[in-house]
Amino acid sequence: MVKEVGASFTIVGHSERRADQHETSHDAWAKAAAARRQGLNVILCCGETEAERDADRAERVVQAQIEKSVPDNADGSWFTLAYEPRWAIGTGRTPTLDEIAAIHAIARAKLRMLIGDAAAGVRILYGGSVTGANAALILATPNVDGALVGGASLTAEKFVPIIEAAASL
Ligand SMILES: O=C(CO)[C@H](O)COP(=O)(O)O
């Protein structure tokens, strides 16, 4: 159905699905695999809650989500990972650049354990309150290969500065 309406990408494992529909990482894995079988590109979201970060569990939570939801045959030709801390989505709050770098590094390492050399070609996006004001620094953070933009993508006035930040790297 998604393909029939012309989509070429699908997002799975989004925090709203995990929180509101109680979707598990296994569900995200099954959806990613099914989407791939239909020829769709997949963006798989992972990310901790605020309580998990406060308990110093963010890295372990993200590692476990990745381990349980990345299909064995994932590679950068169709698969993208997005780190979206739930508490940063739509809130105007973001992790520090060091915190983003730390999670993206462990995400890359976990991907390498799971899919080997293909991990190098998988784009890892950051999502959560990306704006024209913070995009350049976030996009220049190691292992950040792009941004998954929500609210700021809704108007040209807010989105164009993000595109310009990306283009200037
Ligand atoms: O997940 C998102 C919207 O549901 C998006 O990637 C991030 O949203 P934002 O915080 O509004 O940029």
Image (spheres, rainbow, N blue to C red):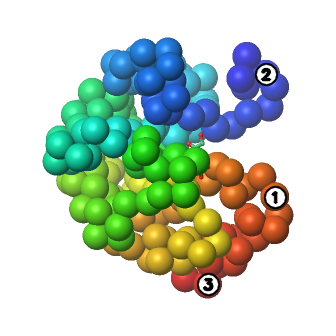
Please identify, in this view, whether the residue under mark 3 or under mark 2 is nearer the observer.
3
Helix, strand or loop at disc 3? loop
Residue 47 against residue 141 in the figure, above or below:
above
Q: Assess mark 1: CB under 8 A from ligand 1?
A: no
Residue shown at 25% from the left, 39% from the top: 52
Label placed on residue 35: none
Q: Mark 2 points at which residue?
A: 4
Dot 1 or dot 3: first in sequence order is 1
Within the image, what quadrant is residue 7 found in?
A: top right
Q: Mark 3 points at which residue?
A: 168
How many C-alpha atoms fall within 10 Å of the one at disc 1: few (<14), some, or many (≥20)? few
Dot 3 or dot 2: first in sequence order is 2
How many C-alpha atoms fall within 10 Å of the one at disc 2: few (<14), some, or many (≥20)? few
In the rendered image, residue 49, in percent from the top left (x then y), is placed at 34, 38
Of the pair 32 and 37, the residue shown nearer to us: 32
Residue shown at 49% from the left, 71% from the top: 139
**Three-letter code, disc 1:** Thr
Within the image, what quadrant is residue 104 found in?
A: bottom left
**Three-letter code, disc 3:** Ser
In the rendered image, residue 17, in percent from the top left (x then y), is placed at 51, 24
Helix, strand or loop at disc 2? loop
In the rendered image, residue 161, in percent from the top left (x then y), is placed at 71, 74
Of the pair 73 and 162, the residue shown nearer to us: 162
Of the pair 114 and 163, the residue shown nearer to us: 163
Q: How many labels does the image show?
A: 3
Q: Mark 1 points at which residue?
A: 155
